């Protein structure tokens, strides 16, 4: 016969477990989807540009740039010794398309008075079926606006693969967007940074077809939970999903992020970098 109060204790324990699970779920959701990146425009550029101060670099884009759903390549760039004297602003916003970035270009990029700007945006355009010509027009408008209001150097990054099967239909579709990026860089005399090409080279060296694109919100949430709750590195999360450069078929593993950081660092360290061009 069950002792008096046993049922009550069971209910209390189950309730506490439920509260704990909901709390953990809320924590993952906040850390992944809701929190701002380190040093966003709203904080770094609230008072406008400060002439004569340290060089300002704005990394603009979507979730791959925000860096809360995968490797934070902007944060890794900020931590490099050669850039400790820079103001590196993270203008990545989860879910952004090229049209979204175009709408916020004044507040998130121009307002910072940047010396250099990186653009990594378009994955959501591909996924949402935005026409390539419309995407190309948005890129052009973004560059024109930055050029008309600042003297910043601009680098356009090609888009990483979606999933790691380069022969998948979605990656054939993505190639047209990367062609638009390269054409826009040439036309506007911006620098083109071959993110996709570097990643594709690594995936081809592996031999055979990689894991086909299979992104879902559930997978993204699960990957984030592994990282934030179980303290697994983004590389470990990627391997657990049969991937190498991407944790959930879209967002960057540590190795994938290092490729982007390396290309950005190489560009910023060029002879005409912001640090050497300032008076």
Image (cartoon, rainbow, N blue to C red):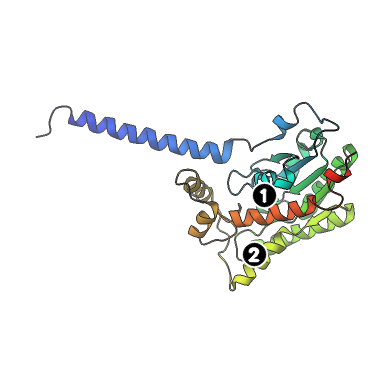
**Residue hosting label 2:** 169
Outermost residue to the left: 1
Outermost residue to the front: 81
**Residue hosting label 1:** 124
Secondary element at image label 2? helix
Decide if residue 216 is on the left or right side of residue 268: left
Q: How many marks?
A: 2
Crowding at mark 2 (Cα within 10 Å: few <14, some 14-19, many 20+): few
Q: Nearer the viewer, residue 244 or 8?
A: 244
User: Image quadrant of residue 50?
Assistant: top right
Image quarter hosting the C terminus? top right
Decide if residue 268 is on the left or right side of residue 12: right
Image quarter hosting the N terminus? top left
Residue 249 in picture, x, y percent from top left: 58, 56
The residue located at (87%, 57%) in the rendering is 186
Secondary element at image label 1? helix
The residue located at (69%, 64%) in the rendering is 172
Question: Where 42 falls versus 202 (above or below)?
Answer: above
Residue 101 in picture, x, y percent from top left: 74, 41
User: Image quadrant of residue 184?
Assistant: bottom right
Decide if residue 279 is on the left or right side of residue 225: right
Crowding at mark 1 (Cα within 10 Å: few <14, some 14-19, many 20+): some
Decide if residue 117 is on the left or right side of residue 95: right
Residue 42 in picture, x, y percent from top left: 71, 30
Rounded to the nearest whole Å, what is the CA distance between mark 1 and mark 2?
16 Å
Query: Given contact means CB atoms under 8 Å apart, are the residues at marks 1 and 2 in contact?
Result: no
Residue 141 in picture, x, y percent from top left: 84, 44
Whether residue 141 is visible here, answered yes or no, is no
N-term-proximal mark, 1 vs 2: 1
Whether residue 114 is visible here, answered yes or no, is yes
User: Image quadrant of residue 43?
Assistant: top right
């Amino acid at each position: 016969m069950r002792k008096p109060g046993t049922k009550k204790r069971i209910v209390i324990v189950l309730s506490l477990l439920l509260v704990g699970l909901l709390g953990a779920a809320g924590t993952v959701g906040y850390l992944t989807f809701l929190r701002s990146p380190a040093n966003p425009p709203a904080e770094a550029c609230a008072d406008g540009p400060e002439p004569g101060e340290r060089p300002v670099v704005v990394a603009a884009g979507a979730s791959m740039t925000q860096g809360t759903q995968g490797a934070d390549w902007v944060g890794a760039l900020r931590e490099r010794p050669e850039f400790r004297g820079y103001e590196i602003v993270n203008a990545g916003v989860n879910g952004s398309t090229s049209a979204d970035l175009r709408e916020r270009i004044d507040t998130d990029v121009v307002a910072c008075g940047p010396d250099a700007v990186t653009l990594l945006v378009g994955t959501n355009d591909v996924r949402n079926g935005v026409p390539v010509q419309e995407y190309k027009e948005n890129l052009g408008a973004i560059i024109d606006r930055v050029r008309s209001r600042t003297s910043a150097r601009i680098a356009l990054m090609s888009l990483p693969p979606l999933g790691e099967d380069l022969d998948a239909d979605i990656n054939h579709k993505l190639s047209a967007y990367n062609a638009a990026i390269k054409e826009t860089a040439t036309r506007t005399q911006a620098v083109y940074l071959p993110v996709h090409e570097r990643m594709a080279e690594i995936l081809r060296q592996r031999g055979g077809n990689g894991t086909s694109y299979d992104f879902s919100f559930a997978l993204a949430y699960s990957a984030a939970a592994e990282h934030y709750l179980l303290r697994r590195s983004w590389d470990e999360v990627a391997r657990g999903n049969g991937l190498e450069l991407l944790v959930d078929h879209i967002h960057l593993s540590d190795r994938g992020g290092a490729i982007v950081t390396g290309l950005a660092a190489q560009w910023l360290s060029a002879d005409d970098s912001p640090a050497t061009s300032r008076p």
